[in-house]
Structure formats: C-alpha cells, structure tokens
Image: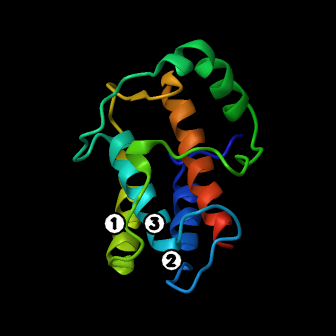
Amino acid sequence: MMKTIFEKSMRDELISRVNALSENNKAIWGKMNVYQMTKHLNIWNQWVLGIDNNIPYKQDLLGKLIGKMVLKSNTKNDKPMGKGAPAGSNFTIKEEIGDFEKEKKTLIKLTEHYEHYNNPDFIHGFFGKMTEEQIGIFAYKHYDHHLRQFGV
C-alpha cells in the first residue's frame, strides 16, 4: 500500500514530523530556509485543497507534453522525490524571515484538512488533472521531501 496523505496514520506521522521542526533546523539541500519551506507547503496545500487559493488551475505546455508520464513515475511506488525539483514561481517564497510558529500551526491545520478533501476542480500546473489517489500519494511525497530536506 502506497503512503497517502488521506490515511490518518500518515497524516499523524507528518504532523509529528512538522512538530519536530524548529527555527534552528538547517536545510540539508536546497535554497529554502525552514520558514520559507513551511510557508511554501502552506501555499501549496491551500492550492491543492482549494482554500484561499488565488493560483489558477491550469496545466502548462510542458506539462501537457510530459506531465502524465512524470506523474505516473512519481506515484507508482514509495520512492522519495528527488532533490532539486523546481518549486514553481507561485510557490517560491522570497521573504527569508517571518512568523515561523504561525506557519507551522497553519501547516498542521492544513494537514488535518486532508481528512475532508473535496476539490474536484484541482488541476496541477504540471501534471494536469490528477485522481484523488494520485493527489494523496503526491501530497505525502511532497511533505516527506521537504521534511527530509530539514532532517525530520
């Protein structure tokens, strides 16, 4: 069985890992600091969940050409996401400092919100239309990727 954010035990694991984060966590790879990473995940989750979302649901041209193939390879097994995947301009956080504890609390609330996921309009900017199963697997992997980035 694939790890998915729609499973309560997986959400609980992710929340536990988020709770382990502190402002002192340093990135093992990548350009974001821990504040930027939590804010990045919050904006991304609001987009996926359809909460306070100003980011359009529209697949880009490259995604139309290869998105489904990449999505399939990203959701066919539990292999973690690779390092260095681009965040996308809508999800790049410019400010380097902010209220980390507030972002962390928001991230936990958004994680819990996946229990009641209902956003049939969601279209990923690269992958396009995704099944709920694909969304659950990819969301888990996205969290895992960034939490591993900060050693938790």
* Amino acid at dot 1: Thr
Depth check, mark 1 against mark 3: the one in front is 3
Secondary structure type for disc 3: helix
Say which residue appears at 59% left-offset and 13% top-offset. 65
Could you tell which of marks 1 and 3 lies nearer the N-terminus? 3
Could you tell which of marks 3 and 2 lies nearer the N-terminus? 2
Say which residue appears at 49% left-offset and 17% top-offset. 61
Q: Is residue 6 left or right of residue 44?
A: right
Q: Nearer the viewer, residue 140 or 12?
A: 140
**Which residue has dot 3 on it?**
36
Say which residue appears at 67% left-offset and 26% top-offset. 70
* Amino acid at dot 2: Asn
Q: Is 11 placed above or below 85 here?
A: below
Q: Residue 19 shows which numbered tag?
A: 2
Q: CA distance from mark 1 to mark 2?
A: 12 Å
Q: Position of residue 23 (x, y in %)?
A: 49, 84
Q: Is residue 77 left or right of residue 94?
A: right
